[in-house]
Image: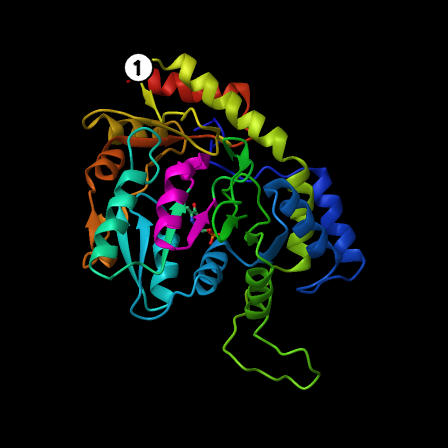
Amino acid sequence: MTDTRIYLSPPDVSDLERKLLLDAFDSNWVAPVGPDLDAFEEQVAEVVGVRHAVALSSGTAALHLALIAAGVRRGDTVLVPSFTFVATANAVVYLGARPVFVDSTPDSWNVDPALVAEELRARAERGQLPRAVITVDMYGQCADYDPLMEACDRYGVPLIEDAAEALGATYRGQPAGSFGLAGVLSFNGNKIITTGGGGMLVTDDGRVAKQARHLSTQAREPVPHYEHRTVGYNYRLSNLLAAVGRGQVQRLDQMIAARRATFEYYRAALPDLTFMPVAGYGAPNYWLTCALVDGDDRDRLIARLAQRNIEARPAWKPMHLQPVFQDCVVRGGGVSADLFRRGVCLPSGSALTEHDRERVVDAIREG
Ligand SMILES: *Cc1c(COP(=O)(O)O)cnc(C)c1O
C-alpha cells in the first residue's frame, strides 16, 4: 500500500504546542502543578463560560469526581445514556452505584429527554429517584438541555454533563460543559483538542471545584505533615501536558472549522448516506462525522476503507448490549441498537487534507 494511513481522529499538534511544551520543560516545571496548569484551566473555563476548572489526568477521572460531588454512593442508581463510550457508565460502577440506561432519540442521537422525564416520574412514584442523571453530548453535539434540565430540576436530581466529545459546541448559545452541577471534558488523543491524555471538571459551583481539587491530589489536608481525613486519588494533570493544552485550546476555533468543513464535504459528496442530524437547537463542534448505512453494507464499507488504508469505525455499541452491563436495567434501547447496527464514523481529524477527504469519498462511492 503506497497511500499513507488516514486515521479516524488523530492528534493535530503544531509548533505552538511544541514551543509551550519545551518552555515548560526548560523552566523545570516538570511537576503535576505549575503555571501552565493554572493558565490552561483559565483558558478552558473561559471557553466553557464557567467560574472553575480543575485539570485532571482523564475525562474518566473527571466523571468519577463529578459523581462524588453529586453525592453518588454505593447502592444508588444513576441514569446514563445507553449510547455512549463505556467510560460514562464505568465511573458510576467505580462508586458501587448502578447505571440505569436510557435510549437515544433519532433526532440527534443523544439521550431522549422524554424517556429521562418518564423514568424520573416512574422512579419518583416508587420513591426510588436516581442520585444523578448523566447526559452525553454525542459526537460533539449537545443533548437537548431545556427539557432535560426541567425534568432534573422538577425532581431535584443533579445533572452531570459528559461533554468529553463536545468542547466548543453550544446549545442555544450556551457552551457545552456548562450545564448542570458539573461538566466533564476529555483531552484524550482522539478528542477535538488533546494533551496526549487528560481531562477537566468544569463547574460554576465553588464547592464542587474545591472538592475535586482536593480529592484529585490524594485529599491532603493543608498542613505540612500529610494529614488525610478522606480517601483521595492521584488524578491531577501534569504541568507539562497542560502546556500542550494551552496551545491546543488557542487553536480550538480553527479545529472546529476544519472538522465542520469535512462534515460539509462528506455530506455534499455522499448524498446517499444519512448523516447524524444536526439539531436546530445548537452548533456542534463536528468532532466525528457519522452516518447510517443500511443492511450488511456498513461492515463491508468499513472493510473496504480498511483495504485502502483508511480507518473508519462502527458507532458506539450501546451499554445495554455490553456483556459487562447485562444485568442493568434499560429504558427503551431500540434506537441506540439501530445506531450501532448501521452507524459508521468517518475520518474526521482537523488535519485531514483535501486529498485525504477525496480518498475517503472515492472509496465509499466504489461500493
Ligand atoms: C473519551 C470519552 C470519555 C473518557 O475520556 P478519557 O479522557 O478517555 O478518560 C468519556 N465519555 C465520553 C463520551 C468520551 O467520548
Position in image of residue 359 (x %, y %): 44, 20
Q: Nearer the viewer, residue 124 or 361?
A: 124
Q: Is residue 239 above or below residue 167?
A: below
| Residue farthest along the bottom direction in this orientation | 225
Q: Is residue 358 visible?
A: no
Residue 119 position, x and y percent, is: 24, 49
Residue sitting at 64 percent across and 60 percent down?
238
Place of residue 70 in the rendered image (x, y in percent of width and height, measured from the top left): 44, 61
Drawn side of residue 31 relative to residue 345, left or right: right
- Amino acid of disc 1: Asp
Disc 1, SS = loop
Residue 128 position (above or below residue 266): below
Which residue, given by chain and number where applicable, does mark 1 sit on? 272
Tell me where the magenta segment starts and ends, as one range: 137-164
Q: Residue drawn at (46%, 23%), measured in percent from left and top?
A: 263
Choose between 262 and 327: the one closer to the eye. Answer: 327
Rendered view: 18 above or below 72: above
Quadrant of the frame with the N terminus:
top left
- Residue at position x 39%, y 43% in the image: 150
Q: Does the magenta run of residues contain 160?
A: yes
Q: Is mark 1 within 8 Å of ligand 1?
A: no
Queried whether the magenta region covers residue 41, the answer comes back as: no
Could you tell me if residue 54 is visible in this image? yes
